[in-house]
Amino acid sequence: MKDADEKRIAAKLAKTLAMLCVRNTALEDLHAGIIPVTRTGDHSDVMVIDAEGRKIPWTEVSHFDDEVMRALMRQIVNRLYTFHLMADDPGLREMIDRWAVAAGAWDNPEIDQGLLRAVRVEMNAGDS
């Protein structure tokens, strides 16, 4: 297979997986709500006041707790698992094809250099 074809297929699969298995999850609930106004553009001028009256900069606020993170990751893992096991199911196949069109409008993915660096660090740690 040509390199360009391999990259095109990998990009389509990555975007479809992101759409079906990550975006359309509880992440949508975390994304919902009122977006605070920022004049600096980086939210450094936004504060949150908690129930104890603490004034916390937006950039330092955890936007969801460990329980929400665990539930989100569990849902994403379950969706990825289902996608891989059931990709030949006609109903899921139809949904994949439909969402692949929507995800096709997204920016093309790029190689994640941070992930590759982490892999190299892990591999070098194993050599020690």
Image (cartoon, rainbow, N blue to C red):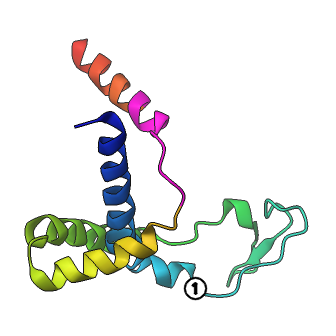
Q: Position of residue 27 (x, y in %)?
A: 45, 76
Q: Position of residue 5 (x, y in %)?
A: 32, 44
| Above-or-below relation of 115 to 26 | above
Q: Position of residue 124 (x, y in %)?
A: 31, 17
Using residue 58 as the reference point, say whether residue 1 is left or right of it: left
Residue located beneath label 1 in the image: 32
For residue 69, say whether it is visible: yes
Image quadrant holding the N terminus, namely top left
Using residue 87 as the reference point, say whether residue 10 is left or right of it: right
Segment tinted magenta in the rendering:
107-117
Q: Amino acid at mark 1?
A: Ala
Residue visible at 23% across and 13% down?
Answer: 127
Using residue 43 as the reference point, say whether residue 79 is left or right of it: left
Q: Nearer the viewer, residue 3 or 44?
A: 3
- Disc 1 crowd rating (10 Å Cα; few below 14, some 14-19, many 20+) is few
| Above-or-below relation of 53 to 61 | below
